[in-house]
Amino acid sequence: MTLPRVHIATDHAGLKLRDYLIEHLCGRGFEVVVHGPAAYDAQDDYPAFCIRAAQAVIADTEAGEPALGIVLGGSGNGEQIAANKVQGIRAALAWNLETAKLARQHNDANVVAVGGRQHTVEEAAAIIDAFLDEPFSGAERHTRRINQIARFEATGELPADSTGTEV
């Protein structure tokens, strides 16, 4: 099995975790690509870093290369929001093993957001490992829902509700 390339971005609040994860994930055999920042700066802004990582996930995927992303910050919330602005990204905020697994199983999430100030580095690494190791289930109901979201993203048209009528 080919491991996906992992694109990672953070701000100053997730820098310690990012550095830990680079070593951890490379030790597991992943190729890790860093999208910023280069050094600690308490005034840095996460949006550009996270958007670049998300864009790289899409570029790799479109080129036929398996890729996933990790965005980190103090809470992971803003980083998730920034990544989700990239068309085709399904970024999920994971705060425990189950939310990380479900993000992949049910939502085919291609980016995980984790709060560096919410977990020890070991806890965060376990959450990210769970995300990276879990495959998408491929279940029809999950695929249908993902396709509805993608269609809305591309066209702005609301999907019908489960009864077949527009909401």
Image: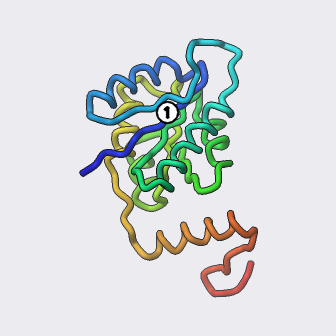
Front residue of 46/48: it is: 48
Task: Give x and y (percent) for residue 77.
Answer: 62, 38
Task: Give x and y (percent) for residue 86.
Answer: 65, 49
Residue type of the residue flagged with mark 1: Ile
95 horizontally vs 40: left or right = left
135 horizontally vs 143: left or right = left
88 horizontally vs 160: left or right = left
Q: Residue furthest left?
A: 1
Front residue of 96/107: it is: 107
**Disc 1 target residue:** 8
Quadrant (top left, top right, bottom left, bottom right) of the C terminus: bottom right
Residue 53, compared with residue 1, is above or below; it is: above
Front residue of 1/136: it is: 1
Residue 57, compared with residue 10, is above or below; it is: below
Q: Residue at the spot x=68%, y=48% of the render? A: 85
User: Is label 1 in a helix, a strand or a loop?
Assistant: strand
Q: How is the image coloured?
A: rainbow
Q: Residues within 10 Å of mark 1 (few under 14, many from 20)?
A: many
Task: Give x and y (percent) for residue 161.
Answer: 65, 79
